[in-house]
Amino acid sequence: MKNKKIILGVTASIAIYKACDLVRRLKEEGFSVTVIQTKESEEMIKPVVFQSLSGNKVYRGLFDMPEAWEIEHISLAKQADLILIAPATANVIAKIASGICDDLLTCVVSATSAPVLIAPAMNENMYKNKITQENIAKLKNKGYMFIGPKKGKLACGDTGVGCLAEVEAIIKEANKVL
């Protein structure tokens, strides 16, 4: 058993369904997985699904009442061996690049000293947007790591770059980082 703790940040991309398989596969690899869901992602998949798959509490809101006294974004940031954001929207990438901490996930990323691996998933035009590319370059320059996206069939029906990297590729990269 690896006994390493991965905080999986899940954002509101249509690729969110792949995050379910990612949780399952990370657990099979011996990782402990704790999910942080953005509020918007809950419109696509309810937290109970990730809780069932991970076997751990799903963290959601920045101001949710903790079960025990702790400052959640700090305690989660300290316990992470890796923060993996998959799928990562253009919005969360922009917020992290700008230092905006307005939800639990961005606060944890800001407070951690653990490596951060980001797996973007969005429409090709959004991914290739100059501002998104500048944000990705800025984060890479600061030591954040990225995997994907890959070319494939997008939710809008177009084919292009923007599909979430394959689950196996994300697992391989997480193993490499750890």
Image (cartoon, rainbow, N blue to C red):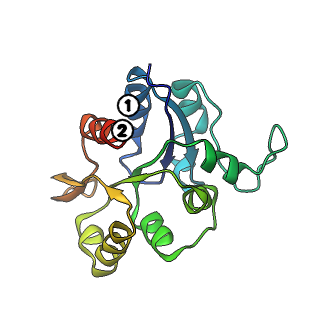
Quarter occupied by the C terminus: top left
In the image, 59 versus 70, the foreground residue is 70
Instruction: Tell me the amino acid under the disc marked 1.
Output: Asp
Q: Viewed as shown, does residue 146 lie left or right of 96?
A: left
Residue 151 at x, y = what percent?
Answer: 15, 54
For the residue labelled by badge 2, is the local secondary structure a helix, a strand or a loop? helix
Q: In this view, does 3 lie above or below 19?
A: above
Helix, strand or loop at disc 1? helix
| Percent x, y of residue 81 | 50, 41
Expressed as whole percent of the image width and height from the top left, the position of residue 144 reads 38, 61
Nearer the observer, 60 or 68: 68
| Disc 2: which residue | 18
Q: Residue at x 52, y 33 (%)?
A: 33
Dot label at residue 153: none
| In-image side of 34 versus 155 (left or right) | right
Contact flag, marks 2 and 1 (Cβ < 8 Å): yes
Residue wearing tag 1: 21
Residue 18's place in the image compared with 99, above or below, is above
